[in-house]
Image (tube, helix red, strand yellow):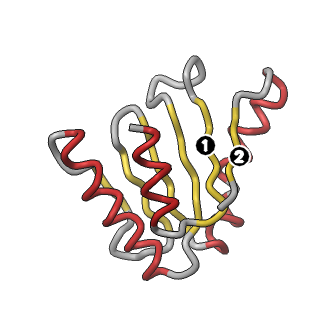
Amino acid sequence: MLALILQSLDDDKAEDVVQIDLRGKSTVADHMIVCSGRSTRQVTAIAEKLSDRLKPMLGHAPRTEGKSQGDWVLLDAGDAIVHIFRPEVREFYQLEKMWLDGDAAGGGNGTTTAH
């Protein structure tokens, strides 16, 4: 599933993709992926296409939040949670920093992949 998510984000030109390994740190999911889209339209399009690509694997569409606004969309695919932000919103919340700072102190399991 993680490979499909990362490929989908790459195909749809998501920017500044950060993958965070949550195994052993959270019971919510095994992976968190944070990325940016340049506009509300791109954020929404990335989310819609990713949802469509995950549907056959999951047997249902992943749960989504925030798609109607397009500033920050969350897709919950069970083992993986994907956050898609407009850059300004991502900078404001600094969501990945919270998790990656914890990695730096605990051995560094976060992976940054810039596209």
Horizontally, is 52 left or right of 65 in the view? left
Residue extending furthest toward the right? 105
User: Which residue appears at 53% of the width and 69% of the height?
Assistant: 13
Q: Report x, y in % for residue 32.
A: 53, 41
User: Which residue appears at 70% of the width and 35% of the height?
Assistant: 110
Label 1: state its secondary structure. strand
Disc 1: which residue: 19
Instruction: Work out which quarter of the rendered image holds the N terminus and state it.
Output: top left
Q: Report x, y in % for residue 96.
A: 67, 48
Location of residue 56 (image quadrant): top left
Residue extending furthest toward the top? 24
User: Which residue appears at 55% of the width and 72% of the height?
Assistant: 37
Q: Report x, y in % for residue 107.
A: 80, 21
Disc 2: which residue: 112
Whether pointer 1 and pointer 2 mark residues with C-beta atoms closer than 8 Å, the reply is: yes
In the rendered image, the vertical position of residue 69 relative to residue 59, given as above or below: below
Instruction: Work out which quarter of the rendered image holds the C terminus and state it.
Output: bottom right
